[in-house]
Image (cartoon, rainbow, N blue to C red):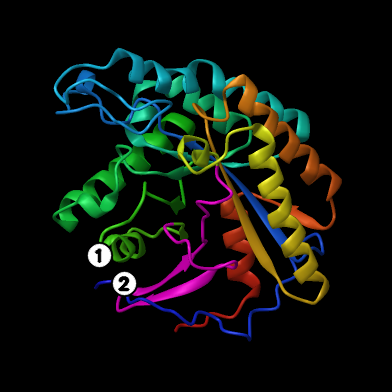
Amino acid sequence: MPIQRDLRGYGRVRPDIIWPNGARVAVSLVVNFEEGAELAVEQGDAETERYGEVASTLPPSVRDLAQEQVFDYGMRAGLWRFLDAFADANIRSTFMMCGRAVERVPDLARAAIDAGHEPAVHGWRWLSHALYGAPETERRDIERTREVIARVTGVTPVGFMSRGSQSAWTRDLLIELGFDYDSNALDDDLPYWSPSPRGSMLILPYGFDTNDMKFFHPNGFVQPEDFSGYVSAALTTLLEEAERGRSSMLSIGFHLRICGRPARFRAVKAILAELARLDGRVWVATRADIAKYFRDVAEERPH
């Protein structure tokens, strides 16, 4: 069943959610673990992924070693910066994992989850699920991604988010497969329920604005302070609203190859310092923990 567009959402009467530590603002840190799952001639694809540090200038059929190395850096160096910084800050995040990436570097995937972070399904390849032409093919790839993550890390993922848009039937497949939440949504500041003839799926909205991918946008971030300052502004607004009794959730997205670079990592450090300063006023949690708490305390409200 196609997802029905909902322009109203909760409206003015929003759920009154007090998160476990008494805060009204929940914060989810998301690290995308997708390097090695991108389009690459090296993997037998017709072309190499063009979205990167610089635009590829090679014809589609020619292997682009430079673009591959932009991605490789994330696994080789960026991952360890994130894991060390999160450990120092005593922060748990959600790692959105592509199955092909986990298959290629199982030891690195295991290291992230052994450090206490949550694994979630990010598709088999780093591709939009809107490209699937049949639900059977998409279901197979979701299942095999979940299986390889569970086998490698010892933890079965309960959450899902693909690159970009999902297909018309992705959400129904997630319901059938027993996922706890779907994060292919950009349309609210709180989790909500999405109804379907097959049941209801809990949606944990994501964000493309509080996201380091905007360093790769021509109209996006340039200096690390651009990103950390933007996140700080978002937190300030949500905390001001919390003073008036409004509850919310903020997602902050990272990529190993983007903010894993030394200069841009200063933004990560600044964001972690800001969250530490706001301890007690925000609840920093994995998406699985946010989903579980919301499911336990919020009344399901199909639209």
Q: Dot 2 corresponds to which residue?
A: 3
How would you rate the neighbour count of disc 2 (Cα within 10 Å): few for under 14, some for 14-19, many for 20 or more?
some
Kind of residue at disc 1? Ala
Residue 274 in which image quadrant: top right
User: In the image, is 72 to the left or to the right of 287?
Assistant: left
Residue receiving disc 1: 168
Front residue of 272/280: it is: 272
Using a 10 Å C-alpha cutoff, classify the residue at mark 1 as few (fewer than 14 neighbours), some (14 to 19) or many (20 or more).
some
Q: Which residues are magenta?
A: 184-211
- As drawn, is 63 to the left or to the right of 299? left
Q: Residue at x 78, y 69 (%)?
A: 242
Dots 1 and 2: beta carbons under 8 Å?
yes
The vertical placement of 256 against 297, above or below, is: above
Q: Residue at image x 80%, y 76%?
A: 244
Quarter that holds the C terminus: bottom left
Between the residue at mark 1 and the residue at mark 2, the CA separation in whole angstroms equals: 6 Å
What x and y, as percent, mark residue 198? 31, 74
Q: In the picture provided, is 235 more to the left or to the right than 173?
A: right
Q: Position of residue 72 (x, y in %)?
A: 42, 18
**Which residue is rendered at x = 14% and y = 56% of the image?**
134
Upstream in sequence: badge 1 or badge 2 = 2
Could you say which is closer to the camera, residue 244 or residue 175?
A: 244
Corner quadrant of residue 93: top right
